[in-house]
Amino acid sequence: MHPLLEAIAQRSSLNHFDAEARLDDADIRELIGWASRAPSAFNLQNWRFIAVRSESGKQRLRQLAWDQPKVSEAAVTFILCGVLPDTAQLPARLQSSVNAGFMPAAMPHTWQQAAEQLYSDSPLARRDEAVRSATLAAATLMQAGQALGLGACPMTGFDTEAVASSFGLGADEIPVMLVAMGRARAGNWPQKPRRPLEQILELA
Ligand SMILES: Cc1cc2nc3c(=O)[nH]c(=O)nc-3n(C[C@H](O)[C@H](O)[C@H](O)COP(=O)(O)O)c2cc1C
């Protein structure tokens, strides 16, 4: 089986982490480097990652996350923030694609106009985009972690307003998901069985 498919097949949401295992800043930078390879609309990259790895930070986050032990037992718990799209930043974000020689010079402006049409009158569309981008980054982060021998658990069991305030999120940032990550310890369940394709797939 292809290693990527093997990883998808083997992944499970961990409940038990080795509380002694640590990740250093270089490990965390590597993980977020991979997470940032996730796609985002217009390549907005409208996300921010807070790596909570100090003991005090993890305890503070745990209290805001239903006191789930894995928040502090994992080596790091990431707060994945989705950022409401700011179309004014788009030309600068796309300039490196122009500089690399594959994107026509006029395209950033065209994309900016399209993005303005999509988001300007719709707070819901802006919020959806922030949630989508952070969610795709979360999935990519978990896959990268697995490839590096780590396990993870995505979490939405937390008080969003309290996390936003306690960790200083901006008014345009949504704490979309927590991802606890570290070394697995014994006692975790395997991946749970999934619904049959007949119930979830429509071949149109
Ligand atoms: C959006 C989202 C929120 C979740 N929130 C929590 C959570 O707060 N606490 C927890 O223990 N697991 C949480 N999970 C993990 C799910 O319970 C888990 O993915 C699901 O039971 C399937 O298990 P598996 O991934 O091991 O097959 C969450 C998963 C997702 C995708």
Image: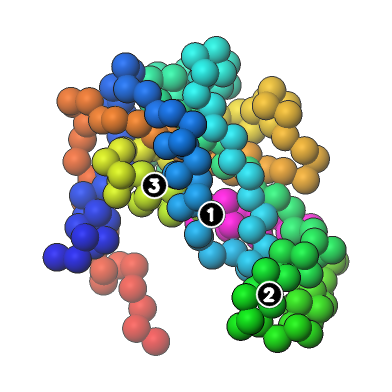
**Residue at the (31%, 38%) spot, across then down:** 151
Q: Which residues are magenta?
A: 123-136
- Left or right side of 31 for 3: left
Q: Find residue 126 and report its horizontal and vertical position in percent.
A: 73, 59
Magenta segment: does it hold 132?
yes
- Left or right side of 11 for 76: right
Name the residue tied to disc 2. 99
Mark 2 element type: helix
* Type of amino acid at the residue the image marks with label 2: Asn
* Type of amino acid at the residue the image marks with label 1: Ser
Q: Earlier in the sequence, mark 3 or mark 2?
A: 2
Q: Find residue 160 and report its horizontal and vertical position in percent.
A: 64, 33
Residue 189 appears in which quarter of the rendering? Answer: top left
Q: Is residue 184 above or below residue 106?
A: above
Nearer to the camera, 28 or 174? 28
Q: Could you tell me if residue 66 is visible in this image?
A: no
* Type of amino acid at the residue the image marks with label 3: Met
| Residue at the extreme left of the image, as rendered | 1
Magenta segment: does it hold 126?
yes
The residue carrying pointer 3 sits among few (fewer than 14), some (14 to 19) or many (20 or more) residues within 10 Å by Cα, namely many
Closest to the camera, between mark 1 and mark 3, is: 1
